[in-house]
């Protein structure tokens, strides 16, 4: 088996020693398995079949489009993620808010919030993307604004 390990350098040395053996190999991002430290500072994504690790401080939003979930980063790129929005809602830090069934947004990148007449908000991010806060999430998002 081939593993790729993400974590702090001091822990990586220990993990390499612990896992090194005849049947375990420490590899790169193309490895069969990836072990990440459980501090949730990254999201694992795919870009044309290649695994990419996106730091959370660069993530603008996570959203569903059809059957797939995508991570939108601050430069406008988007990457597919294998994580479900429900799983991400549980592990993402407090600056990420669920604003609809299909969107989780990073509050640090909100530039403009416009109210509509039917209990919805339109959120524009610093990169110019627009996301709708649906009625189900209206009141929790309104608390964030206050």
Image: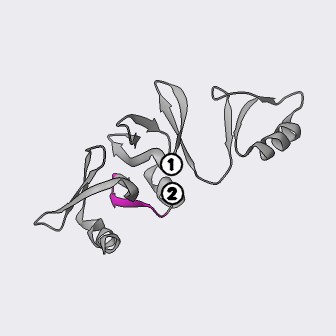
* Pointer 2 local density, CA inside 10 Å: few below 14, some 14–19, many at least 20: some
Q: Residue at x 67, y 37 (%)?
A: 34
Q: Position of residue 77 (x, y in %)?
A: 38, 34
Q: Residue at x 44, y 46 (%)?
A: 59
For mark 1, what is the residue? 56
Under tag 2, what secondary structure? Answer: loop
Label 2 or label 1, whichever comes before in sequence order: 1
For mark 2, what is the residue? 92
Image-quadrant location for residue 107: bottom left
Q: Position of residue 46 (x, y in %)?
A: 49, 32
Query: Mark 2, mark 1: which one is toward the viewer?
Result: 1
Q: Position of residue 142 (x, y in %)?
A: 28, 71
Image-quadrant location for residue 6: top right
Q: Residue at x 85, y 28 (%)?
A: 23
Report if the CB atoms under discs 2 and 1 are less than 8 Å apart: yes
Q: Which residues are magenta?
A: 94-102
Q: Position of residue 85 (x, y in %)?
A: 44, 52
Quarter that holds the C terminus: bottom left
Whether residue 144 is in magenta: the answer is no
Q: Nearer the viewer, residue 3 or 23?
A: 3
Q: Residue at x 68, y 49 (%)?
A: 37
* Pointer 1 local density, CA inside 10 Å: few below 14, some 14–19, many at least 20: some
Whether residue 97 is in magenta: the answer is yes
Total count of labels? 2
């Amino acid at each position: 088996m081939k593993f790729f390990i993400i974590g702090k350098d001091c822990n990586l040395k220990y993990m390499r020693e612990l896992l090194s053996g005849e049947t375990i190999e420490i590899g790169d991002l193309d490895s069969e398995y990836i072990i990440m430290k459980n501090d949730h500072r990254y999201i694992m994504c795919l870009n044309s079949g290649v695994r990419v690790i996106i730091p959370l401080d660069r993530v603008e939003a996570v959203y569903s489009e059809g059957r797939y979930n995508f991570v939108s980063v601050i430069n406008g790129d988007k990457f597919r993620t294998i994580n479900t929005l429900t799983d991400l809602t549980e592990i993402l830090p407090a600056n990420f808010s669920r604003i609809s069934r299909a969107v989780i947004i990073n509050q640090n990148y909100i530039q403009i919030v416009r109210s509509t007449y039917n209990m919805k908000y339109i959120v524009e991010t610093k990169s110019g993307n627009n996301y709708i806060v649906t009625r189900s999430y209206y009141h929790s998002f309104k608390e964030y604004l206050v």
